[in-house]
Image (cartoon, helix red, strand yellow):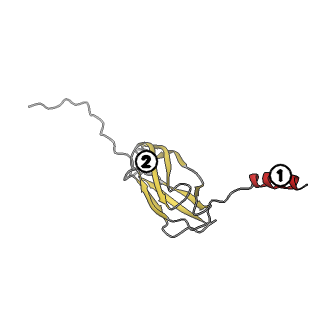
Amino acid sequence: MKQFLTACLMIAGAFTVAIAQGPSISLDKDVHDYGTISQGADGGCEFTVTNDGTEPLIISRCKGSCGCTVPKCEKTPIMPGATSAISVRYDTKRIGPINKSVTITSNASNEPTKVIRIKGKVEASDINNAGGAPVKPASTGAPLNKE
């Protein structure tokens, strides 16, 4: 009977979920997809960070892969079980594909350096809208005056 109980306890122990010791970072998503957006549209998005660990999580740095991607992280410690937001703003004045990253540096025991990404495509605005894409004037067809 003792052997049976010992075996049951060992099996039950194998199925318990382990809580990470120390701070542990997890995010609601690794990639934000803007899809196709218009030039000058709101380039903001947000990632939710959760501390799944047993000690406060401290995000020491958030860095975009270029100047067109600007992240903002809270510097206050994230207590165990609590969440915080990382906001990212992409400069949508630039037309073309979006494929940028943000590197998060923290004291997390599971991933001290975590990379998240943004992707999508910025299309030129309607040229009739104020603030739209610059447009090259149409040629009048008149011959050039060569002197």
Q: Residues within 10 Å of mark 2 (few under 14, many from 20)?
A: many
Residue 47, image x, y percentages:
55, 56
Please give the count of numbered marks on the rendered protein.
2
In the rendered view, tell whether residue 141 sits above or below residue 61: above
In percent of the image, x 81 and y 56: which residue is there? 9
Q: Looking at the image, which is closer to me, 75 or 12?
A: 12
- Residue 39, disc: 2
**Comparing labels 1 and 2, the label whose residue is closer to the camera:** 1
* Secondary structure category for the residue under label 1: helix
Q: Are marks 1 and 2 in contact (CB under 8 Å)?
A: no
The numbered mark, 1 or 2, whose residue comes first in the sequence reads 1
Q: Residue furthest front?
A: 2
Q: Amino acid at mark 2?
A: Gln
In the rendered view, tell whether residue 6 sits above or below residue 145: below
In percent of the image, x 71 and y 56: which residue is there? 17
Quarter of the image where one finds residue 83: bottom right
* Secondary structure category for the residue under label 2: loop
Q: Looking at the image, which is closer to me, 39 or 68?
A: 68
Residue 20, image x, y percentages:
63, 59
Q: Which quadrant is the N terminus positioned in?
A: bottom right
Q: Is residue 125 left or right of residue 145?
A: right
Residue 93, image x, y percentages:
39, 49
Quarter of the image where one finds residue 89: bottom left
Q: Amino acid at mark 1?
A: Ala
Q: Residues within 10 Å of mark 1 (few under 14, many from 20)?
A: few
Residue 56, image x, y percentages:
56, 68
- The residue where tag 1 is placed is 7
Q: Looking at the image, which is closer to me, 19 or 42?
A: 19
Q: Residue furthest left?
A: 147
Instruction: Give the alpha-carbon distance from disc 1 to disc 2, as whole Å.
Output: 64 Å
